[in-house]
Amino acid sequence: MSIIVQKFGGTSVANAEKIARAARRAIKAKLDGHQVVMVVSAMGHTTDELVALARQVNPNPPRREMDMLLTTGEQVSIALMAMAIEAAGHQAISFTGGQVGLITDSAHTKARIRTIDADRIHKELKAGKIVIVAGFQGITSDGAITTLGRGGSDTTAVALAAAIKADACEIYTDVDGVYTTDPRLVPQASKIDQITYDEMLELASLGAGVMHSRSIEFGKKYNVPIHVRSSLTDIEGTMIVAETAGMEEIVVRGVTLKKEIARIVLVGVPNKPGVAAQIFARIAEHNIVVDDIIQNVFDKGQEANIGFTTSLVDFREAQMVCEALAKEMKLRAVETDQNIAKVSIVGIGMKTHTGVASKMFNALAKAKVNIQNISTSEIVVSCLIDAKDAEKALQVLHAAFELDKRGGK
Ligand code: ASP
Ligand code: MG
């Protein structure tokens, strides 16, 4: 008998009616002959509301207590889901993360999964029950309640699917799949039928907020096929898999935009060994997340400008750190720009095709978008641009790679 994991996000369990609908979906899978495990998120915006409540009580809440608070959201959903299934005449049992032995490390609010006890779930499935597991939460080996980071229910679902050797992991959400780009910014965006784990990882980290990136890492590591689909329809969504049909023909699978980026440049840095190490060690000490690094050498190689981008959230602190460094190192200046955006093209076919980057640069040039910096990896080309050009750049790239026509197939 095959096992299916079905994960329902907050919007798919936002009220009693939606809970009943999700319950019917699980029951249908059961009646079709599968063993079914559901993973559910907190209802609607519950987690956000709990975060806001905590901040009213304490602007800087202890992480352990934050986990204690936030996990209550999922505990409400699993109990209601089990009740909804029983009301429809089927057997169900709900479990917290701790109860199914989802053991994590002790990094409160961003814990990582260590092990999952599959036996408990298998036993209940064999007894004919639909098993409902709280997403986003776990327990440390000494019994403290933890969470996996915001959006972590996806990771619970895929990790569970791997642990219990499920045949598929379905992610039910309020969109009908993964798109070639954000449809709110590019109306021609089309649904992607199949995408590889590697491409999906890049899309997730480049700002396409469809799924928690760690869930894709789990999927890739344990080869769990992931089906992202709408909880409102029966239409097939997007399959995330190791290899897609005609993989080499698709040069670019999607284009992404990341905004709210700032750039900080240290001007007049001596061009000698150890300087970059010194600068970035200091930045790391302050836990500032650096994205792209930019270096230009001039003055016959005597001097360099060393810069980096970071999210606007970290900007103020990064600026302070760099100004202190500039003083200590007697640099000429620190230049900043808080209006940066990053557009990227992602596609596994780039590995075997040439001319992809130049096609990107041409499209941007035609649209009179100035490229400030370029970075590449095996399956991504990214350009930093002025934030005012962001949407235009996304649109021209989407058109240049014919993503509207091809539907990313
Ligand atoms: N409820 C948690 C959150 O809102 C986890 C999740 O939904 O995946 O972040
Ligand atoms: Mg989510």
Image (cartoon, rainbow, N blue to C red):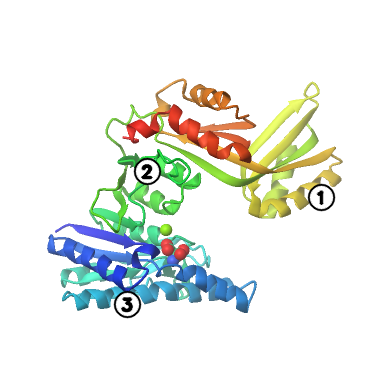
Labels 3 and 1: the sequence-earlier one: 3
Q: Where is residue 209 in the image (x, y as percent from the top left)?
A: 46, 51
Labels 1 and 2: the sequence-earlier one: 2
Identify which amino acid the numbered label 3 is placed on. Answer: Ala
- Secondary structure beneath disc 3? helix
Dot label at residue 79: 3
Q: Where is residue 188 in the image (x, y as percent from the top left)?
A: 40, 38
Residue 51 found in image quarter: bottom right
Determine whether the beta carbon of the residue marked 2 sits less than 8 angstroms from the nearest atom of ligand 2: no
Spatial CA distance of label 1 from label 2 is: 41 Å
Q: Which residue is pictured at 44% across the width and 73% down the height?
A: 71
Dot label at residue 119: none
Identify which amino acid the numbered label 2 is placed on. Answer: Tyr
Asked whether 262 or 69 is in front, the reply is 262
Identify which amino acid the numbered label 1 is placed on. Answer: Ala
Of badges 3 and 1, the one in the foreground is: 3
Q: Where is residue 171 in the image (x, y as percent from the top left)?
A: 32, 56
Q: How many labels does the image show?
A: 3
Dot label at residue 324: 1
- Secondary structure beneath disc 2? helix
Q: Which residue is pictured at 85% across the width and 37% down the height?
A: 332
- 338 vs 392: above or below: below
Task: Determine which residue is flagged by label 2.
Answer: 197
Q: Quadrant of the C terminus?
A: top left
Q: Residue furthest front?
A: 187
Q: Which residue is pictured at 74% across the width and 27% down the height?
A: 297
Judge left or right: residue 207 versus residue 336.
left
